[in-house]
Image: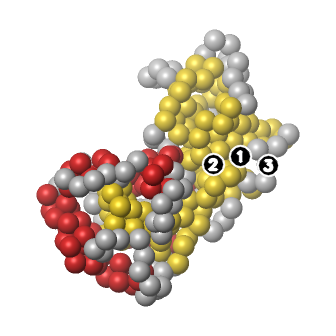
Amino acid sequence: MSLNFGVYGSGHSREILDVIRALEANHLTGRMMYHREIAGELGMKGHTLEEMQSSDLDFMMTVGGDGTILRLLQKADFNILGVNTGRVGFLTGIELSELDDALERMDRGEHFIDERIKLKTVLNGKDIGECTNETVVHTDRVAKIRSFEVLHGDRLVDRFRADGVIIATSTGSTCYSMSAGGPIVDPRVNAFLIVPLSPYKLATKPYVVPTDQEIRIRLTEKGKTCLMVLDGQKECTVDDTDELIFKRGDRTAKFVRFQHDFYKRVRKKLVWK
């Protein structure tokens, strides 16, 4: 099987660029298509994401960290082989040193697609993006607390005062949500997490809720504003007059995997020093 790969990323070291050039010369001759950012670094012809989506690519290889993957998933929909050249790389599938072996295994069909739900964020009836990890609504001023009301479907979940609130997917449970005290959720579980950020009352706790109903958040203080951030990539200001709705996305995030190793990855990358 001869698969065609796109390559996406930017700002890479000479070592990483040399590895990509070697792949082009030896393993993937004529089977690689470069996004224009990384193409400029390589001195090769580049393409827009729109051009790459309309081509016959089988997979998109992201070279970077989790942020590179999240940035791509905000803009396009590909089967992603994440090559980690960042620090943690929890979403990425392999390390740079494993790339040659991974490509050979993919050519032999020794891989599978790990499909994850996404979170759609709707502001005043307008779809503003789908997140792989989370949308965060937090105070736009340092040391200023805000009051929130959260509903799941037509049922009140909680009213609380906090620095903010995170709405995360099960995939995002190992990201900002975890740092804020939320639980780690197996990504095979179709659930959303509602995680208050530094709540004023100790009794205010995170919730894990099913994805079959919308989550609505309202700022309950007149004239107060917050900043809403989607996967760390897109942000906007919201206030008490805005309607915020979160629901299951229309698309999914699709990752190339070679084994079912979620708990092993948690132990290796998030627990052990």
Quarter of the picture containing the N terminus is bottom left
Image coordinates for residue 56, horizontal then vertical, percent: 48, 66
- Which residue is painted at 59% across and 62% down in the image? 116
Q: Secondary structure at mark 2?
A: strand
- Give the structural element (helix, strand or loop) at label 3: loop
Q: Are marks 2 and 1 in contact (CB under 8 Å)?
A: yes
> How was this image coloured?
secondary structure
Residue at point 45%, 41% (across, down): 232
Q: Is residue 108 above or below residue 11?
A: below
Q: Say which residue appears at 58% left-offset and 19% top-offset.
A: 225
Q: Earlier in the sequence, mark 1 or mark 3?
A: 3
Real-space CA distance between mark 2 and mark 1, rounded to the nearest whole angstrom: 6 Å
Q: Amino acid at mark 3?
A: Gln
How far apart marks 2 and 3 lie (CA) works out to: 12 Å
| Circle 1: residue type | Lys
* Element marked by disc 1: strand
Residue at mark 2: 119
229 vs 36, nearest the viewer? 36
Horizontal and vertical percent position of residue 266:
45, 67
**Disc 2 residue type (three-letter):** Leu
Task: Count neighbours of disc 3 (C-alpha within 10 A) and say few if under 14, some if 14 to 19, many if 20 or more.
Answer: some
In this rendering, position of residue 102 left or right of residue 39: right
The first of marks 2 and 1 along the sequence is 2
Res. 247 mark: 1
Crowd band around label 1 with a 10 angstrom C-alpha radius: few (<14), some (14–19), many (20+): many
Mark 1 touches mark 3? (CB < 8 Å): yes
- Horizontal side of 11 relative to 122 (left or right) equals left
Residue 205 shows in this picture: no
**Residue that appears at 50% across and 56% down:** 53
**Label of residue 213 in the image:** 3
From the top left corner, tell me how far across and down residue 211 is, in percent: 73, 54
Question: Which of disc 3 and disc 2 is earlier in sequence?
Answer: 2
